[in-house]
Image (cartoon, rainbow, N blue to C red):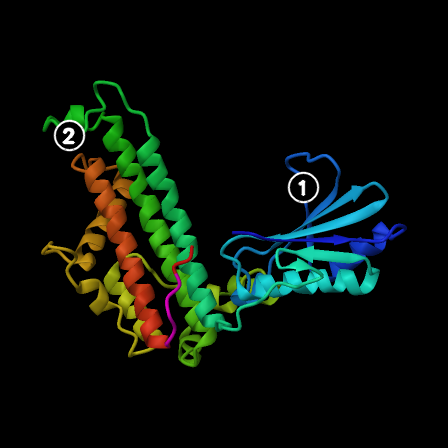
Amino acid sequence: MSFNSENILPEGTSYNKLINLINLLGYTKKRNQFKIQGVLGSYFWYEHKNYRSYVGVELDIYKENSNILVYTRTRAGRSYWDLEHQNKTIKYIKDYFKGSFSTDEGKNRYFIIDENVPTELEAGLFIARWVYNNALIKPKIYLDSRNLKSDISREEYTGISFIDELNPRFFSNNLLIPYLVATWEDYLKKSFIVLLKYTDNRDKLFKEARFSVNNLKDISAGNISIEKALVEKFSFQRPQIVAENFKKLDEKLDIFTVLNKPISNRKSSLFNSIEETVDLRNTFVHEGGIDVSINDKKLKVIIKDFEIAVDRIYDRFGSYYNFEPNRDF
């Protein structure tokens, strides 16, 4: 559900002054991609620092008769701070230019904001999980919509290697393995950066870090945060190394145990299944090797394993740092 508002500005309002105010509120201009008639300008606000925005605030300016109209919108999944900035925008436009406004709450009524404000650590870990959720949508849609009808695209392997390795289904499935490992690694890096930024156990890691001259130049120029520069020195593919990395940050933060538990009725743990998938990734990327046993069913199991592993880690963060995991993606 989106939250929408409309400010109706008095006749004679200066368009340039309105743009100046919008710029001061931190909005950036965006292209009118859909060429909507009557739109004078489209803008977007998103707080990139401190993980305060989930979806940002959209703002459009229209001209209707002799009045300028300003619309704002936040999409479902907005954060506390997104909605707060939407209210702030409505208020500043009303206070500066007068006129009237209305929201989904009614005429001249601001949006009601939930008083339960998440910590920036909680918000950052949620965004990392949200980004991962969106990343997994792509391979799921791909598998469900892919159209492979040729005889060679059989669903099961024949056991004849030269035929199976030419099967576009198996080749396509193997192509997805590096993507799945990359998104898994990206989730863990993003989460590690959040913890590195907002927990107290960071000094030791920074003291041990050996930044190159180029790293220091990028940090000084603001091209990269010191946390990201540090994280790039670590690997986040194999579960064993992942668990060790988080223990470097906090000795009591145990990721190994949650990954080493069995899944469903299988004997193999998530720890082992992800290790095997990383091996598949390395063979494919470095040697061009194709595993013809990866049919559609097995690939969906691999995707699910990564998703469950990420959920378990996210839940572990919640229990350890005392917050309720949010799955309103």
Where is residue 178 drawn, in percent x and y?
32, 45
Q: CA distance from mark 1 to mark 2?
A: 47 Å
Q: On residue 11, which mark appears?
A: none
Residue type pointed to by label 1: Arg
Tell whether 202 sits left or right of 320. right
Q: Identity of the amino acid at label 2?
A: Glu
Question: In the rendering, which numbered label is found on residue 156?
Answer: 2
Look at the numbered discs 1 and 2 and tell me whether their residues touch, using CB distance below 8 Å.
no
Q: Is residue 126 left or right of residue 319?
A: right
Identify which residue, 287 or 328, lies in the foreground: 328
- The mark total stands at 2
Q: Main secondary structure of the magenta part?
A: loop
| 199 versus 86 height, above or below | below
- State whether residue 266 is above or below residue 316: above
Residue drawn at (44%, 75%) of the image: 206
Q: Secondary structure at mark 2?
A: loop
The image position of residue 223, as x and y in percent, is: 58, 60
Pick whichever, 296 or 230, lies toward us.
Answer: 296
Image position, residue 202 (x, y; %): 43, 77
Looking at the image, which residue is at 28% across and 69% down?
Answer: 244
Image point 29% across, 43% down: which residue? 177
**Boundaries of the magenta span:** 322-326
Dot 1 corresponds to which residue? 31
